[in-house]
Image (cartoon, helix red, strand yellow):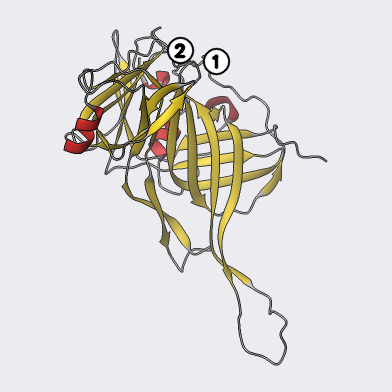
């Protein structure tokens, strides 16, 4: 057989008990992804001893886990205003596996919000079918970055680490059901930085979760799970250059001023998503050239306001 790169399927489901496979199914847990890549994180145990011969001794493989990366779109469920468990976006288990807590506010006028959390963190199981090979990963925790550009879809880039389970031969199962909602492009975004409606082409943020192994000599591969030990959320914006009288970007940088950021994807209920950050703060200042127009390139720190709130995603 020939294994084709474009033929793949990813299933994701929140675990009830850490490390216990909840058995995701194609009908209920399929996620539309692009560019899934699976690789082992393995420690090579080299036997580097002095001997008469210069030839190497055979090595062994010690601690090991699996890592997977893939991209998804930013889109809602298509269900307007309800804010019920059945209305969560397709990426709900991924967000929970990256340390986000979900809050359901029932409608009418309902919404589903995701905020960073510091306790009660969830783990997920991932099934990754790569056209003939199945990788199962349990006890997964991860991180993600997000990129939005004017006129394009918002894109998440995810990285998860999970326990090493021997891959198996398995065809891609039939019956995968994906959410049919089309993602909204980044247009008419009602974007604001502080009280200023900056002319921005793109913004990014990276949760930068610190995912570390929990080592255990009693476990088959030396790893019993993973811990999310911290996060250092950062991002960037690229506003057009204006005078300091119009908006004091340089003054804010010098003073370390924190400002709120807000932007909206889509306007139709069921397809609208707000991304907000209460305390963005410039880390550096630089200039860029955007189609002959001078712009700023500003790396940002996403600071907390009351705690566990440095960025929020809200689905309407």
CB within 8 Å, label 1 to label 2? yes
Secondary structure of residue under mark 2: loop
| Near-viewer residue (220 or 235) | 235
Name above or below for residue 188 compared with residue 250: above
| Near-viewer residue (211 or 253) | 253
The reply, left or right, for residue 136 in relation to residue 149 is right
Secondary structure of residue under mark 1: loop
Name the residue: 66% across, 34% down. 8
Reading the image, the residue beneath label 2 is: 78
Name the residue: 41% across, 12% down. 266
Name above or below for residue 107 compared with residue 300: above
Residue 180: mark? 1
Q: Quadrant of residue 83?
A: top left
Q: CA distance from mark 1 to mark 2?
A: 8 Å
State the image coordinates of residue 143 (x, y, percent, origin top left): 42, 42
Name above or below for residue 292 compared with residue 136: above
State the image coordinates of residue 24 (x, y, percent, origin top left): 54, 35
Name the residue: 62% across, 25% down. 176
The reply, left or right, for residue 229 in relation to residue 157 is left
Question: Circle 1: is it few (<14), some (14-19), or many (20+) Cα within 10 Å?
Answer: few
């Amino acid at each position: 057989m020939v294994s084709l790169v474009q033929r793949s399927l990813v299933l994701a489901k929140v675990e009830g008990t850490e490390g216990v496979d909840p058995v995701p199914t194609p009908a209920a847990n399929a996620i539309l992804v692009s560019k899934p890549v699976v690789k082992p994180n393995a420690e090579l145990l080299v036997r580097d001893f002095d001997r008469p011969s210069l030839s190497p001794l055979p090595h062994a493989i010690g601690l090991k886990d699996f890592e997977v990366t893939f991209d998804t779109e930013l889109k809602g469920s298509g269900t307007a205003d309800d804010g019920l468990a059945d209305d969560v976006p397709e990426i709900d288990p991924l967000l929970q596996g990256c340390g986000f807590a979900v809050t359901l506010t029932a409608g009418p006028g309902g919404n589903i919000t995701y905020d960073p959390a510091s306790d009660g963190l969830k783990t997920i199981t991932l099934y990754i079918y790569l056209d003939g090979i199945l990788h199962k990963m349990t006890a997964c925790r991860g991180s993600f970055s997000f990129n939005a550009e004017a006129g394009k879809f918002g894109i998440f880039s995810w990285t998860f680490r999970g326990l090493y389970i021997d891959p198996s031969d398995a065809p891609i199962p039939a019956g995968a059901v994906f959410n049919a909602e089309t993602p909204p492009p980044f247009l008419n975004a009602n974007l604001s930085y502080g009280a200023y409606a900056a002319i921005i082409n793109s913004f990014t943020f990276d949760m930068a979760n610190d995912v570390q192994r929990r080592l255990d000599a009693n476990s088959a591969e030396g790893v019993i799970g993973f811990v999310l030990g911290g996060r250092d959320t950062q991002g960037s914006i690229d506003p057009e250059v204006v005078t300091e009288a119009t908006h004091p970007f340089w003054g804010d940088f010098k003073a370390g001023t924190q400002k709120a950021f807000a932007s909206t994807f889509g306007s139709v209920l069921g397809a609208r998503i707000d991304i907000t950050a209460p305390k963005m703060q410039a880390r550096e200042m630089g200039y860029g050239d955007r189609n002959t127009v001078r712009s700023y390139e500003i790396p940002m720190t996403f600071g907390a306001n009351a705690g566990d709130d440095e960025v929020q995603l809200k689905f309407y």
